[in-house]
Image: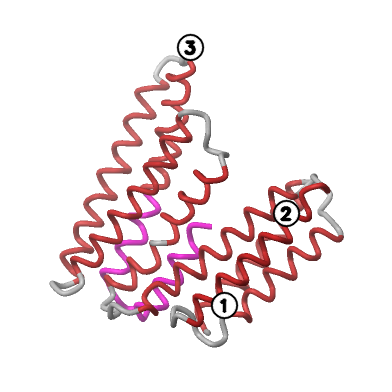
């Protein structure tokens, strides 16, 4: 999922921007740091007995990931050039704040809380305009097009997965997709999206319709079915 806004950001940046390419591994390393540190902090909060060396390993790798991510992002900011730096830093600040809310919720055992998940996804989606800005993309509504596309996909997947195995939630899933489509229409009217934004989302909505009509046999099958949808969506969104 993290790769979607990265690829959209690189497409907007033109694929050749060194600064944009540096933002990608920085974001990935922050994601790895989350998975290294949050389980440890969850166990500490719950008062669980930790295996020998568990805390030290988690803290070591989490620190290494964060330090490397900081160095890569700092290099990206320097390479981005003076006009782009304030935009990149502003987007990174908002993304970090949203990620921090999700991290706090996860540590408190509320990572599956809908609002927390949506805020975390919004922070992840901002990677796209961050990379585009680092690559020299001008400040305009189109700068946030990648974030809008990624967020639409994220929210669709969230509604779809939450409806899996819960027939009573099908109506809420359908309503969520109507709301997502309406939001994308508004975003298109505001100049964020290209005129062909609906093409990749046609696949996404078809996936949801098929999944509600004939649900996968298990979560593994659901995940395997999602892979080609995600790849096709990203490829079409980058081209269009």
Q: Nearer the viewer, residue 30 or 154?
A: 154
| Residue 78 - label | none
From the viewer's perspective, is residue 57 above or below residue 19? above
Look at the magenta stretch and give its main secondary structure. helix
**Mark 2 or mark 3: which is in front?**
2
Q: Residues within 10 Å of mark 3 (few under 14, many from 20)?
A: few
Which residue is located at x 74 percent, y 53 percent? 222
Q: Give the CA separation, mark 2 to mark 1.
A: 20 Å
Residue 138 position in % (x across, y down) = 28, 80
Residue wearing tag 2: 172
Between discs 2 and 3, the one toward the N terminus: 3
- SS of the residue under disc 2: helix
Q: Is residue 80 above or below residue 226?
A: below
Circle 1 is placed at which residue position?
A: 185
Q: Quadrant of the N terminus?
A: bottom right
Q: Which residue is mark 3?
A: 49
Please state the horizontal and vertical placement of residue 240, each as a whole percent of the image: 53, 85
Please report the bounds of the magenta region as a residue range.
Answer: 1-29
Q: Are marks 2 and 1 in contact (CB under 8 Å)?
A: no
Quadrant of the image occupied by residue 52: top left
* Above or below 200: residue 34: above
In this view, the residue in front, 7 or 127, is 127
Q: Earlier in the sequence, mark 2 or mark 1?
A: 2
Q: Residue at x 44, y 42 (%)?
A: 102
How many residues crowd mark 1 within 10 Å: few (<14), some (14–19), many (20+)?
some
Horizontally, is 147 left or right of 138 in the view? right
Q: Give the image quarter of residue 74.
A: bottom left
- 19 sits left or right of 27 in the view: left
Residue 161 to residue 4: above or below: above
């Amino acid at each position: 999922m993290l790769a979607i806004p990265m690829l959209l950001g690189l497409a907007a940046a033109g694929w050749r921007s060194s600064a944009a390419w540096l933002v990608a591994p920085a974001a990935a390393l922050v994601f790895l740091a989350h998975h290294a540190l949050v389980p440890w902090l969850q166990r500490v909060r719950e008062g669980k007995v930790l295996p020998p060396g568990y805390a030290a390993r988690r803290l070591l790798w989490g620190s290494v990931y964060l330090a490397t991510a900081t160095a890569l992002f700092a290099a990206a900011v320097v390479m981005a050039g003076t006009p782009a730096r304030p935009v990149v830093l502003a987007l990174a600040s908002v993304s970090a704040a949203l990620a921090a809310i999700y991290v706090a919720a996860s540590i408190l055992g509320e990572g599956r809380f809908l609002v927390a998940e949506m805020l975390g996804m919004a922070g992840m989606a901002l990677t796209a305009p961050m990379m585009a800005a680092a690559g020299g993309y001008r400040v305009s509504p189109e700068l946030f097009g990648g974030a809008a596309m990624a967020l639409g996909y994220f929210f669709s997947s969230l509604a779809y997965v939450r409806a899996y195995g819960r027939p009573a939630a099908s109506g809420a899933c359908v309503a969520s997709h109507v709301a997502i489509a309406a939001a994308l229409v508004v975003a298109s009217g505001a100049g964020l999206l290209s005129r062909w934004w609906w093409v990749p989302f046609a696949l996404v909505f078809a996936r949801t319709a098929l999944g509600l009509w004939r649900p996968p046999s298990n979560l593994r099958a659901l995940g395997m079915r999602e892979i080609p949808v995600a790849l096709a969506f990203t490829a079409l969104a980058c081209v269009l």
